[in-house]
Image: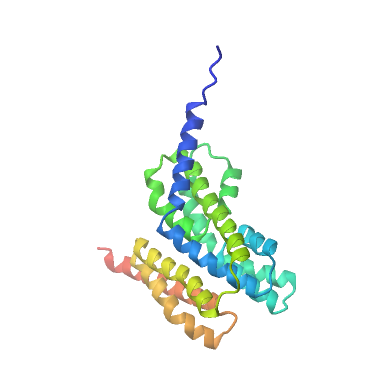
């Protein structure tokens, strides 16, 4: 009789994939879900349809970028400029992808697998992955992250559709409060996971400079605050490194 049992390696990948699926149902995942409840209310109140809202959720897969896209469309911006605004908002994900890729890559990992997995990189999946990948065998990390990232994307896309159908327009304060839960979680998580003081300096600089540049450079406030705060954090890192040298 031929051996019809699954290949042990494939079975191991399935096991780690399911572990990634379970990791998505955690406190960070639930906080992200509450934020997407608010996004569903925002999209419905803004006049978007069910298919459009779910499509934005799955394809853009970044809550701030989704909000930027809605704002750009409502302001009457042309499609290329709306796409540019979304791309500029999502540019902040590039350092996360750069930091996560070496953790995911094994000796024989195809590049196309990393390209596919990069779509699932968002703050929640990135924080969870960076916290837990060290306990995952290197050649099983892509399967684990696929389970984590795909579950977050699919579950929140479905959640947005359900909320859109069942719930009327949420009051503006409720929508704002739900959307605001996510950045609060992001800030506390990144603060706790920062390995160097320069990370804390960057976050504090952003908190201080964000409101200032919102007044001085409306429309370019996030870019300016990130640029200046990042340069300040890098300068602090270099200065501390020089002082620490014997």
Determine which quarter of the picture holds residue 62.
Answer: bottom right
Residue 106 placed where, x, y %? 48, 40
At 68% from the left edge and 67% from the top edge, which residue is drawn? 83
- Residue furthest out toward the right: 78
Q: Is residue 218 shown left or right of residue 9?
A: right
Count up the numbered dots: 0
At 24% from the left edge and 63% from the top edge, which residue is drawn? 246
- Residue furthest out toward the bottom: 215
At 41% from the left edge and 71% from the top edge, which residue is drawn? 202
Query: Relative to residue 95, is residue 42 depicted above or below?
Result: below
Query: Relative to residue 91, is residue 147 depicted above or below?
Result: above
- Residue situated in front as seen by the camera: 23 or 228: 23
Residue 232 placed where, x, y %? 42, 74
Query: Relative to residue 90, is residue 119 depicted above or below?
Result: above
- Residue situated in front as seen by the camera: 2 or 173: 173
Colour mode of the rendering: rainbow
């Amino acid at each position: 009789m031929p051996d019809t049992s699954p290949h042990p390696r494939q079975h191991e990948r399935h096991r780690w994939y399911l572990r990634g699926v379970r990791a998505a149902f955690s406190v960070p995942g639930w906080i992200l879900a509450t934020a997407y409840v608010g996004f569903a209310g925002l999209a419905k109140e803004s006049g978007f349809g069910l298919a459009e809202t779910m499509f934005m959720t799955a394809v853009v897969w970044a809550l701030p970028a989704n909000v930027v896209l809605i704002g750009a469309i409502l302001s009457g911006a042309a499609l290329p400029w709306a796409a540019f605004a979304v791309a500029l908002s999502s540019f902040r994900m590039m350092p996360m992808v750069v930091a996560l890729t070496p953790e995911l890559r094994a000796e024989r990992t195809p590049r196309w697998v990393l390209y596919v997995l990069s779509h699932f990189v968002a703050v929640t999946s990135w924080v969870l992955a960076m916290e837990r990948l060290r306990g995952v065998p290197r050649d099983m990390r892509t399967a684990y992250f696929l389970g984590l990232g795909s579950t977050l994307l699919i579950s929140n896309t479905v959640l947005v559709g359900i909320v859109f159908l069942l719930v009327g327009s949420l009051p503006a304060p409720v929508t704002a409060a739900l959307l605001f839960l996510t950045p609060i979680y992001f800030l506390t998580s990144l603060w706790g996971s920062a390995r160097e003081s320069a990370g804390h300096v960057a976050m504090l600089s952003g908190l201080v400079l964000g409101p200032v540049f919102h007044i001085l450079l409306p429309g370019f406030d996030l870019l300016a605050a990130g640029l200046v705060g990042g340069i300040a954090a890098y300068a602090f890192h270099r200065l501390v490194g020089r002082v620490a040298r014997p």
